[in-house]
Image (cartoon, rainbow, N blue to C red):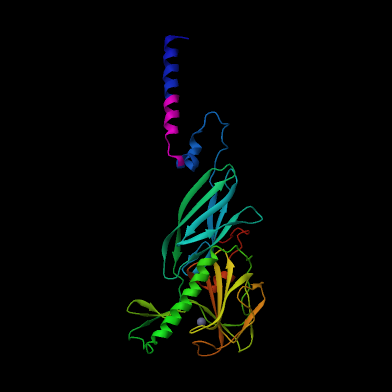
Amino acid sequence: MTRRARQWTAILGAAVLMLGTLMLDLPARWQTEHVAMSAPLEPTARPRQPQQPPTIRWLPERVHEGTLLNIIVEGGVPAVLHAEGMFAGEPLHFRMNDNGVLVALAAAPLDSVGPRALRVSVTHEDGSRHREQLDVIVVSGDYRLEELSVAPQFGRPQPAEVQQRMADEAARARAVSAASHDTPRMWEPPFVAPRESRITSGFGSGRIFNGQVQSRHTGTDFAGAVGTPVVAPARGVVAIVDDFYLGGGVIYIDHGAGLVTAYLHLSAKDVAEGDTVETGQVIGRVGATGRVTGPHLHWIVRYGGHTVNALSLLELPDPAAPSMEH
Ligand SMILES: [Zn+2]
């Protein structure tokens, strides 16, 4: 070996040593994240498979405020085994479908348009992890809003005990939604409508006074005579059967993995708290109980703390079928 070659060998050796030392000093999280793909971290271990992050997308592609969407994680090398994430303040519950694609339900809240951060963290087969943050652009739901130029006539203030009762009932409903994130997912799409009848009042309509949305309709009303049946849209556990001040005869169903549905103004309740109900099972009867002007079913769909348009549950695109609309 020439002197020059020996010099170069020594320089190269020192460089390799320095690089090795540098890599040992890398923060632990770097070693497990996607950054690792550019350089093997352990020279003695066999080379890692080339890493490729999965594709993260959502359906529908155009996301309206106050609707449900599916978050989809597919592809990736090595294969992705597990994913978790957050969107609009609610955890996501990914489940792998028959095609090896991870799908989670999510909700775009009402009255919140613009970019919303979607955070997803995946674990690959070899234990390596990858984190990604994407912006989901949420567009207006185009809900019917009536601008008022004069102050709406508010009813007499409710007595303190009525206000307390309404607050307690709302808190019980919220508790069902919070608990649903810890309930195993019981549902399987497609969902069925609780009634086949005409929709008499859609989700989201409201009145604006002084730039503030007032008395928003956060359910979907179905026509029905008193006594006509109401069915469960999916499998779930009955969480509340009661008579509420505003809602009248109510049933709340926890379907698990964050999804809760509720049925208001019922004349009869055919299930009890703790019952497991199946898709299409009759749970109660249409009525005119609580604060109503006539008999109808007021159907509520919630993902975590967000109340969404119930029709977006019935119209969720099938993630197994790649979207053809662009
Ligand atoms: Zn209603």
**Rendered view: 59 above or below 121:** below
Outermost residue to the top: 2
Foreground: 203 or 303?
303
Q: Quadrant of the C terminus?
A: bottom right
Left or right of 102? Residue 65 is left
Residue at the (43%, 29%) spot, across then down: 21
Residue 256, image quadrant: bottom right
Task: Confirm whether the magenta stretch covers residue 21.
Answer: yes
Residue 262, image quadrant: bottom right
Q: From this viewpoint, is residue 315 visible?
A: no
**Rendered view: 309 above or below 151:** above
Q: Position of residue 212 (x, y in %)?
A: 35, 77
Task: Confirm whether the magenta stretch covers residue 219.
Answer: no
Q: Position of residue 233 (x, y in %)?
A: 62, 73
Q: Position of residue 52 (x, y in %)?
A: 54, 43
Q: Position of residue 99 (x, y in %)?
A: 65, 54
**Rendered view: 72 above or below 123:** below
Outermost residue to the front: 161
Residue at the (45%, 9%) spot, across then down: 2
Q: Which residues are magenta?
A: 16-28
Residue at the (32%, 79%) spot, across then down: 210
Q: From this viewpoint, is residue 253 visible?
A: yes
Left or right of 179? Residue 271 is right
Does the magenta stretch mainly form a helix, a strand or a loop? helix
Q: How many marks?
A: 0
